[in-house]
Image (cartoon, rainbow, N blue to C red):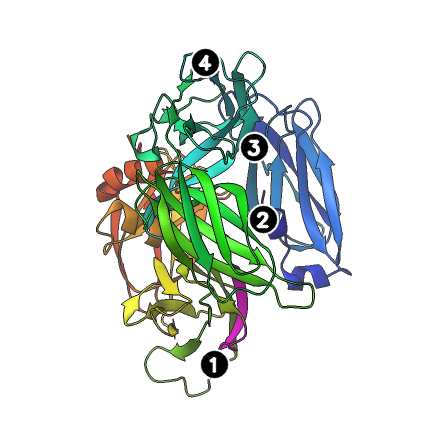
Amino acid sequence: MKGAALLCVATACAAQTAATGSISGVVRDAATGAPVAKAGVRVQLGGGRGATSVVDAQGQYTLDDLPPGTYLVEASAPLEEGQTQMPQQEKTVTLEPGQQLTATDFLLPSMAVISGRVLDENEKPAPGEPVVLVEKRYDHGALRYRLAGGRTQTDRAGVYRLTGVPAGEVFLVETQALPNTALGDSPASAFYPNALSAESAAEIVLSPGETRNGVDIHRAKLPTYCVDGVVEDAPASVLALEFFETLVGNSSHAVQHNPAGLGKAKPDGTFRVCGLHTGRYAITAGGGLPAQMPFLAAGTLEVPSEDVHDFKLRASMSPVSAEFVWDGDPPAQPPHVTGQITLRGLRGYEVFSYGFSAPGSLPRTNKLQPDDYTIDVRGISGGWYMKDATCGGRSVLHGTATLGGDTPCGALRFIIAHDAASLTARVADEDGNPIPDAYVAIVPESAATEADLSAVMTVGQTGPNGVYSASALPPGKYRVLATNETIDLAANRVDKLWAAQSRGQEVEIGANASVQVKLEPQTLQ
């Protein structure tokens, strides 16, 4: 849930003396159009204060006594029993002094259900087994598999039920093997119907409100192996070891999965861990004495069809180094440009956020474990935007940067430009009637693959007047299209957009230009 994003613009929050107004509307199910009773609608007013309204039986809500300003309003449906993903939608609205803003309506996505059984190697029901939902999505220019919100456990009859599954998005279902340090064969993790890897698993796409039964997972017992090794330069204390299975074998797609605390390293750093199936694992060793700084070592291990000996886990950390520079000659009167970058390791246990100002550099304080890190930039305003980020001479703004340890790609270099353009799209039907809540995709002509498109596209939804505006666009050629279908980073939706984007309206936007386009919604199939 994006509760942290529910902020109003600071200038709006300060206008407490102006006449207050209200925001009202109806919350409906996107598939059936039925009112979603007991849904919640809220905004945050700043200073720890918020406004919340509970939807009535007719789906209606009202948020009263709001000072004028721009708000991000969120509607969310109540969670059902066992449901972990909350249907929600957000909208940005501007409230004038004393205005009674009506028809701020929400269409909440319909959820679906997956149910089935987990069967063991003898085709007998397996009780008490964890079952998880896995999403297939594009992320920072690559196709990745990640754990979604759905998680449950089989009952005594080996039956599971995953509720709150978003409709229209591609998912996999997996049963995760419980940690087992015993020698010999043991149950292995498996994807529906009987696959050992995400890439060979069957994909599931559900219709709104659908209950998909019979999604049975058949798993087998497979041989397990042992790993002995040493944590180099470890403190003289016992370190906890965690092994993370990866969802796919390709390191560029690997994501931490199924953390298993399978053992401990001795005070001299040596360890022996058994119970590992053939595959790829990310490993961490952490701990230390109370008087010491926390210790963390990390690495990647390939387990073939045999035991692994003399594996070395290194605590090779290095500080992140970054500089922020202007694109081209600096302005005659350089402004004070600030923002925030977030570095997130693909193994998932390292996340750092840094505030920055330009021109400038980051303080070399936090040290990073060796990993491939994604980069997210937020908070740049005033028409400035992040044109590129490089590491070792390679662009990493929309991909990953290899940081930390002895083999980093080098210092990060962020390039900030001030030639941003803007585009306003007006979406209407063939009779000229504005269409609210339509998705608008702005795709640079440079996108050469589906993965490229997912990383560089700009996507938003039209407001009540059928208008969507995007700013901070780099100058260049684009294709722009509108649709009533959902556009996000789900693999199947990106693939559909890729197939349809050639039918978009071609637009060339110059430096610091503002362009307007008129669009009719298209079908993406």
Query: What's the amino acid at mark 4?
Result: Asn
* Dot placed on the residue nearer the N-terminal end, 4 or 1: 4
- Residue 473 lies, in percent from the top left, at 37, 61
Q: Residue furthest bottom?
A: 332
Residue wearing tag 4:
213
Circle 4 residues within 10 Å: few <14, some 14–19, many ≥20: few
Residue wearing tag 1:
360
Q: Quadrant of the C terminus?
A: top left
Residue drawn where x is 32% and y is 69% of the image: 511
* Residue 331 shown left or right of residue 99 in the figure: left
CA gap, disc 4 and disc 1: 57 Å
Nearer the observer: mark 4 or 1; the answer is 4
* Dot placed on the residue nearer the N-terminal end, 2 or 4: 2
Secondary structure under the numbered disc 1 in the rendered image: strand
* Residue 427 shown left or right of residue 26 in the figure: left
CA gap, disc 1 and disc 2: 35 Å
Count all numbered tags in the image, as a single digit.
4
Residue 68's disc number: none
Residues rendered magenta in the picture = 350-365
Query: What's the amino acid at mark 1?
Result: Gly
* Dot placed on the residue nearer the N-terminal end, 1 or 2: 2
Up-down relation of residue 278 to residue 332 (above or below): above
